Image (spheres, rainbow, N blue to C red):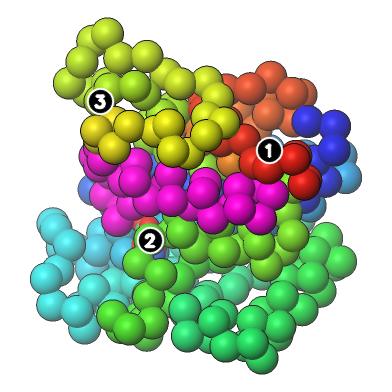
Amino acid sequence: MENVKRIVVKIGTSTVCHANGAPNLKRIDQLCRTITDLKNSGIDVVLVSSGAIGVGINRMGLSERPKEMALRQAAASIGQGELMRIYDRFFTDYGSLCGQILLTKDITENPEGKNNVIATFEALLQLHAVPVVNENDSVATEEIVYGDNDTLSAVVALFTDADLLVILSDIDGLYDKDPSKFANAHRIRVVDDFDSIDAEISDSNTSQGTGGMITKIQAAKIAAAAGIPTILASGKNPEILYEIQEGRQPGTLFAAGKEKA
Ligand code: GLU
């Protein structure tokens, strides 16, 4: 992808964490190393990372996601700190700066708030730091949530005027049928026309996070409307970002309008 100078990478909870919510250190290590390498080659990278609630639940010794909102928000509060510590440690090891940005919908939908956030992203990127973004889950209530980090990542791609959104997930692309149910399901390599996506493609949601396939398609749609293509690919090995850099195209590419791609 020759013209890609700035990318937003979104990574989901089931990719960042083990099944019990404990952080997957090997994967986070690979992610931080690969992102630093991309940055060293001149590409700006913004990371949208889920996992705060999962990591917090694990730290609190709970076996499942609490039903009570205050406890979920406490889990996010504990987990977000832990997650940032881990990101900071690995990024520092590889020579990158990173900075946390926690967003809520009300701030970013308010013109002043939005401009402030955009300026903060720009300042971090000028400093060659990696902005590490999540929803501010410990304060967000129903009225002010994006609700899932897929949508949030598309909003961040717009705010940072990114050239590409990459969603790294526990599924390696969009399939014509649910691959967990149908052995003959095929991965769709390119989606040119969002209207052609069959609603029955299924909203397979096997992850510990809140997003499913529908939120990923919606995120790609938001990005495409702003001329930003999206690649949905497996996050199992974050070095897949090199393949994207080299123009090989793993996963599914949701093409954007001609404006920017
Ligand atoms: N913001 C949530 C977290 O960090 C994840 C939301 C999502 O899975 O999309 O735990």
Q: Is residue 180 left or right of residue 18?
A: left
Residue found 33% across the figure and 52% down from its top: 211
**Disc 3 residue: CB within 8 Å of ligand 1:** no
Disc 1, SS = helix
**Residue beneath label 1, please?**
34
Find residue 148 and name its label.
2
Disc 2 to disc 3, how far (Cα)? 21 Å
* Three-letter code for the amino acid on which mark 2 is drawn: Asp
Looking at marks 2 and 3 on the same chain, the residue that comes earlier in the sequence is marked by 2
Look at the numbered discs 2 and 3 and tell me whether their residues touch, using CB distance below 8 Å: no
Sequence-wise first label, 3 or 1: 1
Label 2 CB sits under 8 Å from any ligand 1 atom: yes
Residue depicted at x 37% and y 75%: 145
| Residue segment shown in magenta | 203-228
User: Which residue does the image show at 38% across and 82% down from the upper left?
Assistant: 144
Q: Residue furthest front?
A: 195
What residue is shown with label 3?
178
Residue 43 image offset from top left, x and y in percent? 82, 46
Where in the image, quadrant-wise, is ligand 1 located?
bottom left
- Quadrant, the C terminus: top right
Whether 170 is drawn above or below 46: the answer is above
User: Would residue 130 be found to the left or right of residue 27 on screen?
Assistant: right
Q: Secondary structure at mark 3?
A: loop
Is the C-beta of the residue carrying label 1 under 8 Å from the nearest atom of ligand 1?
A: no
Towards the viewer: 111 or 53: 111
Q: Is residue 52 above or below residue 201?
A: below
Q: Residues within 10 Å of mark 1 (few under 14, many from 20)?
A: some
Q: Is residue 171 above or below residue 210?
A: above
- Residue 111 is tagged as none
Viewer-proximal residue, 44 or 16? 44
